[in-house]
Amino acid sequence: MRELTTDHISQQFNAELETLRQHFLTMGGVVEKQVSDAIQSLLEGQGDLAEEVKAKDKTVNQLDALIDEECTRILAKRQPAATDLRMILSIGKAVSELERMGDEAKKIANHALKLINEGESPRGYVEISRIGQMVTSMVRESLDAYARLDIDLAVSVAKADRKVDLEYKTAIRSLITYMMEDPRSIGPVFNVIWILRSLERIGDHSRHLCQHLVYLINGVNVRHVPTEELEALATEDKKV
């Protein structure tokens, strides 16, 4: 496990940084469960589980506000530099990605409830299962990368997003064709399409999470770097 934090004269400063990190990982765990539960609620027809996903949105928002307040307080009080500053800035941005993942999980739960209450869609569940598995793995591994400061895992997750995008485009084309052939399916299939869209967006946010981690570790801004160039820049040695 890589270590980036430094020992400060103020033990309180060390404690503040560790608390910030732990709160971030706690929020990540809540969001990860939100995403997996949202998918499960649809595939297994569990309306109660979908309602639990929606209820967790309040917890995610509370943690978002708490972490934002902690980042602001540390910046104002400690005036951190170098690695410490990058950690705070990186976590501040990464938290926004987690909050948006939670929003997308809530959307999935809402559409799942519609499908459960109105009857299953005739198509799209296989695609949701397949893409859902890919995306939940991305969320889990992006958080593991942050916990272990594992830049290789971060790069791997970022690359996986391309596969999700390809699967998403293929699924959408298939579902649109199906709706054209059977207009009666338009209502339920549209709910499936919106779920797939949310899954694709969660994959994007997982990729962004890993890009923020690269910045934390190496000080390289790869937010707008093409995926094929990411690995070279991410592993570039930087003195901090």
Image: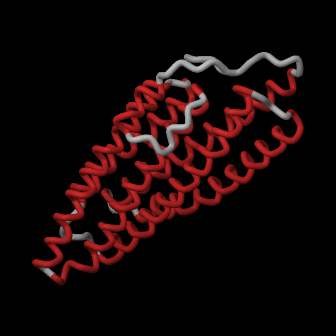
- Residue 143 falls left or right of residue 80: left
- Residue 202, x across and y down, in percent: 44, 52
Picture quadrant of residue 228: top left
Q: Residue at x 49, y 47 (%)?
A: 33
- In the rendered image, the quadrant that contains the C terminus is top right
- Residue at 42% x, 65% y is 47
Q: Quadrant of the N terminus?
A: top right
Residue 32 vertical placement versus 236 (above, below): below
Of residues 162 and 203, which is closer to you in this image? 162
Is 45 on the left or on the right of 140, as rendered? Answer: left
Tell me the colour scheme of the image.
secondary structure
Residue 198 lies, with reference to residue 206, above or below; the image says: below
In the picture as drawn, the residue positioned furthest to the bottom comes out as 184
Q: Position of residue 193 (x, y in %)?
A: 30, 67
- The outermost residue toward the left is 181
Residue 194 percent across, percent down from the top left: 36, 67
* Residue 37 located left or right of residue 94: left
- Look at 14% across and 78% down and name the residue there: 180
Q: How many marks?
A: 0
Quarter of the view holding residue 163: top left
Question: In which image quadrant can residue 6 be found?
Answer: top right
Q: Residue at x 49, y 22 (%)?
A: 236
